[in-house]
């Protein structure tokens, strides 16, 4: 039996989800405008990526609303992990196999790739749900605090990059690794506090909400998107520092 969903959670998710999708679409088209390629080519790849993003959101929303990921027993297989891993795998293949995608991503200003994760401040909802007695503290505290810190720091780090401040790249590396660690901890604690095979904590009040709609959109859309953005930032930083290192060696 699915848990009761508070109205404030529904209101927040229905606001944040389209906002996050708009941010992602904005990055795609920003890259398309700036990349060096014929107009037809760059706008075609941007259109394809946009359709893929929208389809991802629609499929994730449909499966979540149909309780496809919901788990209520400790023998349940954590299918929500499929909703997390499949988009990540697809994004990695696209970046690795399609040079046009890599070129588009390379054209997105790095400060905007970082600033895009301001949406992580919405993770504060985990803290509100914990105070409301709807989430276990083992998950809500690290996930909520880490997300808010990552979202706030994204603006600060992006501003440093935009000003080309001294140490901006080091700060970006630190922010990225912190943000990834926060997501890894949240995924781990989410699995360990939810009904399913990895359930090791919070037996008295298990984490039923995380696999229920609409909160299940976090592990099936918001989290993989955040990991993609972190990965793209690190990839861009490595590409920028590689020529510098080669020049220094020469």
Image: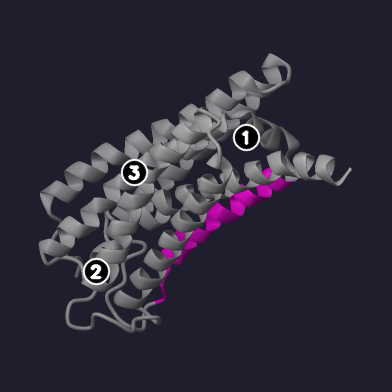
**Residue nearer the viewer, 44 or 19:** 19
Residue 86 belongs to the span the image colors magenta: yes
Residue at the disc numbered 1: 105
Residue 208, numbered circle: 2
Res. 102 image quadrant: top right
**Residue nearer the viewer, 213 or 164:** 164
Residues at marks 1 and 2, CA–CA distance in whole angstroms: 37 Å
**Residue nearer the viewer, 116 or 250:** 250
- The quadrant of the rendering that contains the N terminus is bottom left
Q: Main secondary structure of the magenta part?
A: helix
Residue 113 belongs to the span the image colors magenta: no
- Image location (x, y in percent) of residue 68: 36, 62
Residue displayed at 85% across by 47% down: 249
Magenta segment: 77-96
Model colouring: one colour
When the figure is inspected, residue 29 is found, relative to residue 70, above or below; the finding is: above
Residue at the disc numbered 3: 152
Decide if residue 28 is on the left or right side of residue 94.
left
């Amino acid at each position: 039996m699915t848990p009761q969903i508070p109205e404030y959670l529904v209101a927040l998710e229905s606001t944040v989800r389209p906002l996050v999708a708009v941010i992602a679409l904005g990055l795609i088209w920003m890259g398309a405008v700036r990349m060096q390629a014929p107009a037809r080519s760059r706008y075609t790849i941007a259109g394809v990526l946009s359709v893929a993003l929208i389809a991802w959101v629609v499929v994730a929303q449909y499966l979540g609303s149909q309780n496809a990921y919901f788990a209520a027993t400790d023998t349940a297989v954590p299918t929500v992990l499929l909703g997390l891993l499949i988009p990540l795998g697809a994004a990695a293949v696209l970046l690795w196999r399609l040079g046009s995608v890599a070129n588009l991503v390379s054209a997105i200003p790095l400060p905007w790739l970082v600033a895009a994760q301001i949406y992580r401040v919405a993770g504060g909802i985990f803290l509100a749900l914990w105070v409301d007695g709807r989430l276990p503290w083992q998950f809500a505290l690290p996930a909520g605090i880490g997300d808010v810190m990552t979202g706030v720091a994204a603006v600060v780090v992006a501003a440093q990059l935009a000003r080309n401040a001294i140490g901006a790249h080091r700060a970006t590396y630190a922010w990225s690794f912190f943000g990834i660690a926060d997501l890894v901890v949240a995924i781990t604690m989410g699995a360990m506090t939810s009904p399913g095979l990895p359930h090791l904590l919070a037996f008295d009040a298990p984490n039923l909400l995380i696999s229920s709609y609409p909160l299940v959109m976090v592990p099936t859309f918001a989290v993989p998107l955040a990991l993609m953005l972190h990965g793209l930032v690190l990839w861009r930083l490595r590409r920028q520092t590689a020529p510098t290192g080669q020049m220094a060696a020469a």
